[in-house]
Amino acid sequence: MSAVGAAGALFGRDIRAVVRSRSQLYSSILTPLLFLVFLGNGVSEGLAPANLKAGNFTAYLVAGVVVMTSVFSATFSSASYYKDRDSGLLRMLLSSPHSARTVLFGKSLAGVCIGVLQASVVLLLAAPFVEFEWQYGLVRGLVVAFATIVLLNVMLSGLAQALASRVETMQGFHLVMNLALFPLLFFSGAFFPVDNLPAWLEVLARINPLSYAVDALELAAYADGRSGFFGLALDFAVMGALAVGVYALGLARTPRLTWSGK
Amino acid sequence: MPPPIIEATDVVFEYGERRALDGLTLSVPAGSVFGLLGPNGSGKSTFVSLLAAMERPSAGQLSVFGEEPAAALRARVGTVFQENALDPLMTPTETLQLAGRLFGLSAGTIREQSKRRLAEFGLSERANDSVAKLSGGMRRRLEMCRALLHDPELLLLDEPTTGVDPDERQSLWAALLGRAGGSRTILLATNDLSEADQVCDHVAFIQAGRVMASGTPAELKQGLKRESVRVGWDSPTEEQLATVAGWAGEGQVTAHDGSVHITVDDASAFVPRLFALAPGAIRSVAIEKASLEDAYFRHVARRTQTVAGAS
């Protein structure tokens, strides 16, 4: 019984659970799309196109909703940790001949895969309806966007896993995720430009990991130059380091359950 | 005497300040159905969790298959938890597929073993229904199927029939001890004494993390009075209980929740004297042959008022 086989079995099981949980699947994709349609169209009139690197707010918002989709997905996927714990299944998994780390790895891998898929679907559905420059060419632009989405989801999955193994209840987990991630999301440049913010908010935006994902997606999809951006090299260096570090942190602390599941 | 599969010597386990196992010593022979009996909180589940390598002893020696319990040994062990450990969104077939892959079985073996186990436990027709639609008894049977799927040498059952109706309970044990059972060793942690009396060939009574007595059910019943009288008796006075305990031929007397349990040499002589002692206060009288429960009350008297200890 190899650890790869066991992780693969858990991967398949978690993918199936998400596919069957229709509400999770639909809300993860539809919410960002609705956000895009309504907020994009509604705010386009209010924001001066000259302030936006994309020229119009709908196109501008795409990078933000892709990041937001990944955030939602990581949150939902880690909720499966609590569902498995509460249904008792986690105890069964941990009483198999595999280490708790193998169990967590299989589950988090499914979370990453689901997040990447959902964020990619949102990007691909939005792309035909907005004016993207694809300054590196369509194929290279899509590769950059996909790589960004993968690194982002690895990082978010690690963060969610690290929290889930430390926070006792699902409600507490959602609270911490919302408190931590929504401010990061808003000050990442996902929904409005952060260039003209007060200096202290600009500092927050610069140390915000999500800013680098938004930056890379903007560069890949609709930017028509590199001025005013962090640059892909810095984006990928930051996201790569954080993805490895945070994912390792997520797997470092394994759940400790007693026989009775308490 | 077959060699022991499990050997525990002076095993101690502490949860922070609380000592859940306090020098527990026992030996489980290979091929036996071994009952670990004790009140809630006596340390049964803690001991089973040590065997499954989910916890490590704080002190003492513990071996399973001659080795210190470790994750790898779980491949030779099947487990059924006290509470359900099933995903309600999965079907029984998918549940067994997942378990089979975790235990390293090939796809063909999983198919073959799943079909066999589901048939043995009467679940073939529900193989593709969602677990959420199965009754409580069916879910317990599915857990048994899963525990047996990889044909383990040792089965750890922690109160496996809790919440299962008598019919389901009988069919579950019939399947488990019949063809599905094979020659494997079963460790049954339970506080259901009648169930243990029926299925166990070895028993240990544990209380406060220590073994109070162990042996075959016959050995444990030795020395008990021949018959057991359970009396529905509201509010017996201490004087009345002391009087009963003092009668010649009467043994252990325990009072608990409106019921008094007395072991006696001859119930036919005892019962008329009882009615004479407490006219109008006796609601019911049940007479049985001395059981494992009588032996249990002889050794484990937690939450009961023991009036007399002689037997």
Image (tube, grey):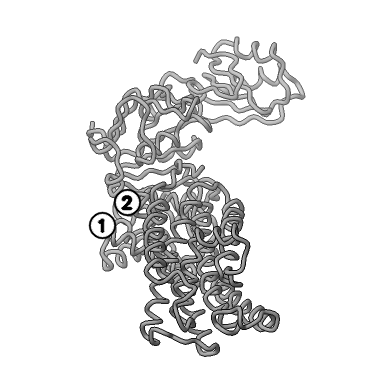
**Nearest to N terminus: mark 2 or mark 1:** 1
Q: Is residue A188 left or right of residue B221?
A: right
Q: Residue at x 63, y 62 (%)?
A: A198
Instruction: Pinpoint the chain carrying mark 2.
Output: A
Q: Quadrant of residue B282?
A: top right
Q: Residues within 10 Å of mark 1 (few under 14, many from 20)?
A: some
Q: Secondary structure at mark 2?
A: loop
Taking the image as drawn, is residue B119 in sight? no
- Say which of B74 and A69 sits in front: A69
Q: Is residue B93 left or right of residue B229?
A: left
Q: Which mark is residue A69?
A: none
- Say which of A80 and A92 sits in front: A80
Point out residue A155 in the picture as x, y percentages from the top left corner: 43, 61
Residue that carries the numbered disc 2 in the rendered image: A98
Label 2 – label 1 distance at C-alpha: 9 Å
Point out residue A191 in the picture as x, y percentages from the top left corner: 60, 72
Type of the residue with mark 1: Met
- B216 versus B120 height, above or below: above
Q: Quadrant of residue B223?
A: top left
Point out residue B243 in the picture as x, y percentages from the top left corner: 65, 11
Q: Residues within 10 Å of mark 2 (few under 14, many from 20)?
A: many
Type of the residue with mark 2: His
Taking the image as drawn, is residue B47 in sight? yes
Quarter of the picture containing the N terminus of chain B is top left
Point out residue A85 in the picture as x, y percentages from the top left corner: 50, 52
Q: Secondary structure at mark 1?
A: loop
> Does the CB distance between marks 2 and 1 fall below 8 Å?
yes
Instruction: Pinpoint the chain carrying mark 1.
Output: A
Residue that carries the numbered disc 1 in the rendered image: A1
Please state the total of marks drawn on the protein image: 2
Q: Residue at x 51, y 79 (%)?
A: A122
